[in-house]
Amino acid sequence: MSIVKINALTVPAEQREVLEKRFASRAGTVDSSDGFEWFELLRPVEGTDQYLVYTRWRDEESFKAWMEGPMKQAHQGGGEGGERPRPAASGSTVWSFEVVQQTGPKTAQDD
Ligand code: HEM
């Protein structure tokens, strides 16, 4: 089964828009990485103030390969050369999970 890596970001209220805009123009390197399965940027509504960057991978090796290469490019902040802009997040923590069960909506083919 797949693995899930979540980056939990602490984002000051006045930086939320900046963060979302950066993600809107994200590098997109992750989409074509070998073993990449899913990405979601989750905006907090209730129960937490942290944004979650949800990613799902075929295995640990795939995630590591992305982290050691394209990840760096994807985190340059969208600027062309020059100084890296101040990060919109003031803190981040990576959480790791193994998928033990999963399901999706039932389709006609399942019947
Ligand atoms: C060091 C802490 C981190 C911070 C503050 C951070 C924040 C950000 C920001 C603001 C972006 C939008 C692009 C940009 O402005 O650079 C981005 C992209 C992204 N981040 Fe992070 N990030 C961090 C580490 C990580 C880690 C460890 C993961 C793995 C779970 C991750 C997953 C992603 C993904 C999948 C994208 C989109 C990349 C793409 O489209 O190719 N980030 N991150």
Image: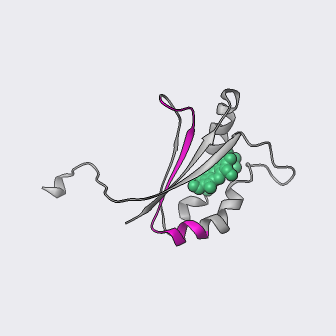
Q: Is residue 82 above or below residue 88?
A: below
Q: Which residues are magenta?
A: 47-65
Between 81 and 90, the one lying in front of the other is 90
Please tell me whether residue 93 is drawn above or below residue 109 in the rendered image: above
Residue at image point 54% right, 59% down: 31
**At which x and y percent is residue 30?**
58, 60
Quarter of the image where the N terminus is located = bottom left
Question: For the image shown, how many numbered marks are present on the structure?
Answer: 0
Residue 60 position, x and y percent, is: 51, 68
Q: Residue at x 70, y 32 (%)?
A: 15
Residue placed most toward the observer, 37 or 5: 5
In this rendered view, identify the residue nearer to me: 20 or 88.
Answer: 88
Colouring mode (rainbow / by chain / secondary structure / one colour): one colour
User: Is-magenta flag for residue 41?
Assistant: no
In-image side of 87 versus 109 (left or right):
right
Q: Position of residue 66 (x, y in %)?
A: 60, 66
Residue at point 71%, 39% (across, down):
88
Q: Is residue 26 visible?
A: no
- Residue 94: x, y in percent? 58, 53
- Residue 77 in view (yes/no): yes
User: Is residue 60 on the magenta stretch?
Assistant: yes
- Residue at image point 59% right, 68% down: 64
Residue with the most extreme right position: 82
Instruction: Tell which residue pokes out farthest to the left in this image.
Output: 111
* Quadrant the C terminus occupies: bottom left
> Foreground residue, 59 or 96?
96
